[in-house]
Amino acid sequence: MRKDWAGSGVDLHLEVAAGGGRRRGLEEALRRAVRDGRLPRGTRLPSTRSLAAELGLSRGTVSAAYDQLVAEGYLATRPGSATEVADVSPATPSDPRLSSEPPPAPPYDLRLPAGPSTTPLHDLRPGQPDLSAFPARAWLRATRHVLSTAPAEVLGPCDPRGRIELRAALAGYLARTRGVLTTPDLIVVTTGFVQALNLIVQVVDGPIATEEPGHDFYREVLRRAGRETVPLPVDGLGAQVDTLTGATAAAVVTPAHQYPTGVPLHPARRRALREWGGLVVEDDYDGEFRYDRQPVGAFQGTAPDRVVYVGTTSEALAPALRLGWMAVPPSLIRPVAEAKLHADAHTEVLGQLVLARLIETHDYDRHIRAARLRYRRRRELLLARLGPGPGQPLPGVALPGVAAGLRALLLLPEEGPAEGELLAECERRRIALRAASPLWRGDGPGGLLVGYAAPSERAYPRALEALAGALAGT
């Protein structure tokens, strides 16, 4: 017997077995609901009269089932109060879906490794801005404006490419600040770079080149999508694009500020990449944050018909917003939009409209300018404390790359200490950062990737001193 619990005030589907008696079937259905977490602790159950009417059972059958489950500890009741779900431990840990143990951390995890204390005291994780500097007031003003002026229709289905308000704002902003040549019709709003990469692999056939060293997480995304990746070596002039062949369908590159070495792509190599025949995926993850000169313009502006330009708010505002964008060549906009439609229909709308408002009012520009000054000072402090010169805590450490971005690569001297030894010391001091060697496919040089943007303004000097102490103490 299959019954739907539809009008009791608790939206829950119960499978009441036909065999073994109605009371026993109801008892087991309720047990499963509590064990599975569909009825969490404190949930108020319907009265016996209401549930009996919903399920077509006698009130006595429901009362007997409730009494049995109260006796077993699944339910709790008090005089004058409704019957509630009691505090029940999770189901048997042999069920992996209900296991209380967390899954193992992947090799690209950015947090502290498991140990006696995994709560960082000093947060120097790369890839994260200073969340305490999020422009909350501007975001609130924009949100109020959107909610008070937007028609109700914006809460309905959306173009898979995203709201036209944000696509139009992005087209103007990217042209003005990054030299991107696009139109609103050629922009697709995504939930970030990972989704953009997953959309691209659905519309391009063949191997995909990724920079070596490069972001290991993105290599894993491509591997899980079933795509072959080939290394694109990087040296002091950026990606060695002359190694790309006609057999490679696409290349994922970071021309403005290579990840993680920090070097921009040399002009001669930009020209060579433009002449190469494959699709270029430009990850402009921090292109707005250049400190010693005007930011290098986006490579997309030199070859808009062959470049997919990707950007996000993850480092400019906050990763949790899950807002990104793709400027797509005309030949790919239809298949990319269709892939987005079948991936998740569209990105959530209110965040898109709020971001569009921030861009239109130039609050976004003001935030970027303030962040650029803040992160420039932090990089200068890091270089002064850890770079070459007297008082360096670990002589021989190299910090390659230009003055840009939200992170620094610290390459360790060959004579030691080893990367693992230094990571252990950082863990002991509760410093959160990440190892550099996994960014190479093979055995990469030892080093640390330090995110100097993550701490608050007050916490950063202490975090930098803690890192200097860890370097000196190994």
Image: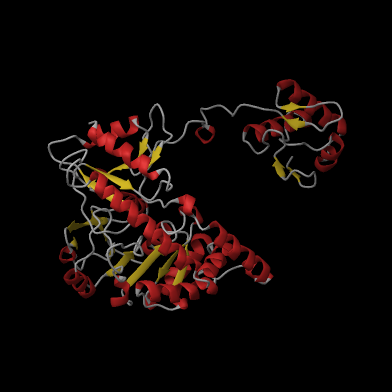
Residue 270, x across and y down, in percent: 21, 70
- The residue depicted at 18 percent of the width and 44 percent of the height is 397
Residue 27, x across and y down, in percent: 73, 29
The answer to whether residue 28 is left or right of residue 157 is right
The answer to whether residue 163 is left or right of residue 11 is left
The N terminus lies in quadrant: top right
Q: Is residue 446 above or below residue 215?
A: above
Residue 17, x across and y down, in percent: 71, 35
User: Can you name the residue that lies furthest to the front here?
Assistant: 390
- The residue depicted at 30 percent of the width and 59 percent of the height is 404
For residue 156, say whether it is visible: no
Q: Is residue 52 above or below residue 290?
A: above
- The residue depicted at 31 percent of the width and 34 percent of the height is 426
Front position in the image: 360 or 188: 360
> Which quadrant of the structure image shows residue 38?
top right
User: Can you name the residue that lies furthest to the left here?
Assistant: 415
Residue 280, x across and y down, in percent: 29, 68
